[in-house]
Image (cartoon, rainbow, N blue to C red):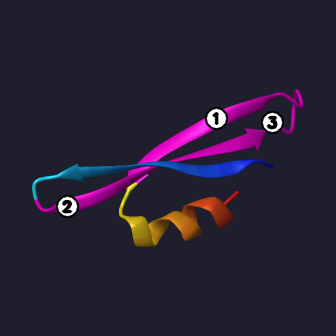
Amino acid sequence: MAKKSVASLQTKSNRLTKAIKMVKSPKTGAYTFVEAIMAPDAVNDFMKKK
């Protein structure tokens, strides 16, 4: 499973990070990409979650 944090976004006083994770479908075996924008300290929890 590939994972990568790709961008740091800055809005007014907040620093945000866009994280993209590749997830394999159990039914078809195809990969899909899941994207989320969150605080930088929450990225590791997002990547560990299945």
Residue extending furthest bottom?
41
Cα distance in 3D space between marks 1 and 3: 10 Å
Q: Is label 2 in a helix, a strand or a loop?
A: strand
41 to 24, vertically: above or below: below
Kindly identify which residue carries mark 1: 33
Cα distance in 3D space between marks 3 and 2: 33 Å
Q: What's the residue at 59%, 40% (across, down)?
A: 34
Q: Quadrant of the C terminus?
A: bottom right
Q: What's the residue at 89%, 31% (across, down)?
A: 29
Between tags 3 and 2, which lies in front?
2
Earlier-in-chain disc, 3 versus 2:
2
19 part of magenta stretch: yes
Q: Is 49 left, or right, of 42 in this rendering?
A: right
Residue 49 image position (x, y, % from top left): 65, 62
Cα distance in 3D space between marks 2 and 1: 25 Å
Between tags 2 and 1, which lies in front?
2
Q: What's the residue at 64%, 35% (across, down)?
A: 33
Specify the amino acid type for callout 2.
Answer: Asn
Kindly identify which residue carries mark 3: 25
Within 10 Å of the Cα at label 2, are there few (<14), some (14-19), or many (20+) other Cα atoms? few
Marks counted in the figure total 3
Q: Is label 1 in a helix, a strand or a loop?
A: strand
Q: Is 21 left, or right, of 17 in this rendering?
A: right
Earlier-in-chain disc, 2 versus 1:
2
Kindly identify which residue carries mark 2: 14
Specify the amino acid type for callout 3.
Answer: Ser
Specify the amino acid type for callout 1.
Answer: Phe
Q: Which residues are magenta?
A: 13-37
Q: Is 8 left, or right, of 24 in this rendering?
A: left
Q: Is label 3 in a helix, a strand or a loop?
A: loop
**Residue contact between numbered discs 1 and 3, judged by CB atoms under 8 Å:** no
